[in-house]
Image: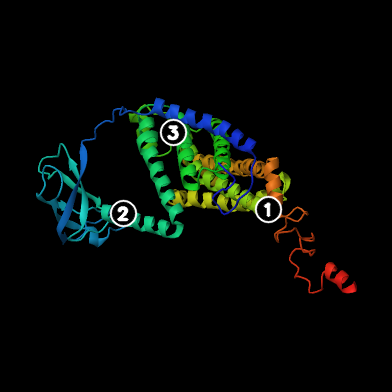
């Protein structure tokens, strides 16, 4: 970790700051690796009850439209394009190549199918008599998703270049840790909050340093993220107990709680921590880089001026991020909000329901964690950027001018340089004093 932060700024830093930073980060990294090894699922997971169904691929060969059946009074009429049968060829499983005639899915949100569409079929292990044992479930979107992924990767690399490549690698590490450690660990019966904390620490340490480089600026962002995650975890634990939330608010959490040995409250805590990490690293990296750039542009700034300037940027950033969080939750819960609106339920009762109360607690706790990230990260970055070793200060003065003939055109405003003029002033056209003395003699 040197003075060059990889963001276009070069600020001399103290060796003591480097040593102090390593003294904190190295133990954290070692503890994270030890906990990863200790909690790693190693293939063991809780037994999931078999539901007797499996998903296979198929292709629609032909579609035969038929008149829709009448619907009960008060129910919306079905789409005429979803009524009928489809001839489907099974492309996976033991019945590969078999052609079956299946009814088209109907009801609210039913999709339209045409000849040539790739579909997902549900196969029942114990079908009813006179049944094909198959059912059309959905469109097969694997090819489309691969195209979206390629377009996303190309756009990131085209704009970010090498930084974009490292960002994609960091994203891959995040998915690997989530899919191979966090999710299997929770399913294996480990405490969800502990698994989430260890997983978040591993993601933070690997992704931030990989994406932004092994620098003091990144280190301050990591330390700020770690401290803010701690605040978020403590607030989450206290808020869930205070609001008496069980973590069971939908069919998914209810099914997990009934069929598997999972602590639903711990699962809620884990979801808050993992969700907060995605926004915290944005805020902390922004604050650390902002303070570093301010220190590079204004070498005379001390801790107080760097902290104040960085905090002004942080307040503007937090104001926009808070609005983003609330809109994201509102967008994700829009069908539920519409359902409450249709039911004419009083606002107080609607807010007190478990699903809405859980989202309120999640939003408030996440926002408080983000707010704490600004002063913590700004103070750490300002402290490091304002501390220099004496030899670094001497080198800095020799480079930028110290009033003893070492100026190279970077004098402070109003100071005199080697040519006896203020910084930024044009060279004088008058003869020098030595020339005047020679003329008089």
Residue at disc 3, secondary structure:
helix
Query: How far across and how far down the image is residue 34, in percent?
Result: 44, 27
Check contact, mark 3 vs mark 1: CB within 8 A: no
Placement of 225 over or under 145, stated as above or below: above
**Of discs 3 and 1, which sits in the foreground?**
1
Q: CA distance from mark 3 to mark 1?
A: 56 Å
The residue under label 3 is 267
Residue neighbourhood size for the residue with mark 3, other residues' Cα within 10 Å, grouped as few (<14), some (14–19), many (≥20): many
Q: Upstream in the sequence, badge 3 or badge 1?
A: 3
The residue under label 1 is 399
Disc tally is 3
Query: How far across and how far down the image is residue 70, in percent?
Result: 24, 56
The residue under label 2 is 145
Camera-side residue of 73 and 149: 149
From the viewer's perspective, tell me whether residue 7 is left or right of residue 159.
right
Residue found 41% across the figure and 42% down from its top: 174
Say whether residue 30 is visible.
yes
Q: CA distance from mark 2 to mark 3?
A: 29 Å
Placement of 247 over or under 88, stated as above or below: above
Q: CA distance from mark 2 to mark 1?
A: 54 Å
Camera-side residue of 40 and 235: 40
**Of discs 2 and 1, which sits in the foreground?**
1
Q: Upstream in the sequence, badge 2 or badge 1?
A: 2
Residue found 40% across the figure and 27% down from its top: 37
Say whether residue 251 is visible.
no
Query: How far across and how far down the image is residue 177, in percent?
Result: 39, 38
Residue 206 occupies which quadrant of the picture? top left
The residue positioned farthest toward the top in the image shown: 38
Residue 242 occupies which quadrant of the picture? top right
Residue neighbourhood size for the residue with mark 1, other residues' Cα within 10 Å, grouped as few (<14), some (14–19), many (≥20): some
Query: How far across and how far down the image is residue 60, in percent?
Result: 16, 56
Residue neighbourhood size for the residue with mark 2, other residues' Cα within 10 Å, grouped as few (<14), some (14–19), many (≥20): few
């Amino acid at each position: 970790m040197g003075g060059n932060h990889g963001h276009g700024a070069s600020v001399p830093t103290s060796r003591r700051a480097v040593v102090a930073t390593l003294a904190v980060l190295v133990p954290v990294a070692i503890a994270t690796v030890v906990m990863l090894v200790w909690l790693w699922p190693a293939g063991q997971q809780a037994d999931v009850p078999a539901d007797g169904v499996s998903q296979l691929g198929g292709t629609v060969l032909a579609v035969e439209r038929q008149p829709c059946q009448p619907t009960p009074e008060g129910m919306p009429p079905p789409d005429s394009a979803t009524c009928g049968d489809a001839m489907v060829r099974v492309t996976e499983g033991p019945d590969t190549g078999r052609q079956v005639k299946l009814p088209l899915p109907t009801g609210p949100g039913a999709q339209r199918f045409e000849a040539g569409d790739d579909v997902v079929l549900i196969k029942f292990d114990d079908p009813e008599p006179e049944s094909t044992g198959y059912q059309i479930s959905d469109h097969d979107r694997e090819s489309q998703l691969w195209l979206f992924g390629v377009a996303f990767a190309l756009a990131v690399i085209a704009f970010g270049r090498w930084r974009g490549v490292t960002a994609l690698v960091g994203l891959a590490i995040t998915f690997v840790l989530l899919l191979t450690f966090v999710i299997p660990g929770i399913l294996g019966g480990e405490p969800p909050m502990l698994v989430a904390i260890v997983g978040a620490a591993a993601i933070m340490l690997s992704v931030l340093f990989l994406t932004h480089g092994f620098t003091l600026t990144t280190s301050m962002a990591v330390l700020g993220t770690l401290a803010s995650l701690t605040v978020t975890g403590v607030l989450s634990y206290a808020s869930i107990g205070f609001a008496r939330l069980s973590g069971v608010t939908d069919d998914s959490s209810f099914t997990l709680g009934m069929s598997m040995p999972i602590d639903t409250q711990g699962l809620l805590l884990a979801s808050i921590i993992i969700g907060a990490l995605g926004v915290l690293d944005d805020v902390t990296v922004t604050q650390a880089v902002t303070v570093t750039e301010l220190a590079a542009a204004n070498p005379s700034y001390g801790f107080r001026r760097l902290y104040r300037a960085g905090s002004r940027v942080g307040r503007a950033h937090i104001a926009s991020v808070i609005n983003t969080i609330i809109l994201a939750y509102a967008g994700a819960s829009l069908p539920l909000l519409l359902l409450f609106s249709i039911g004419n339920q009083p606002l107080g009762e609607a807010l007190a329901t478990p699903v809405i109360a859980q989202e309120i607690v999640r939003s408030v706790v996440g926002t408080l964690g983000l707010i704490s990230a600004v002063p913590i990260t700004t103070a750490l970055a300002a402290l490091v950027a304002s501390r220099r070793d004496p030899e670094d200060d001497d080198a800095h003065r020799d480079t930028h001018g110290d009033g003893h003939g070492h100026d190279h055109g970077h004098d402070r405003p109003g100071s005199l340089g080697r040519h006896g003029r203020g910084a930024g002033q044009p060279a004088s056209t008058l003869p020098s004093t030595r020339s005047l003395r020679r003329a008089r003699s």
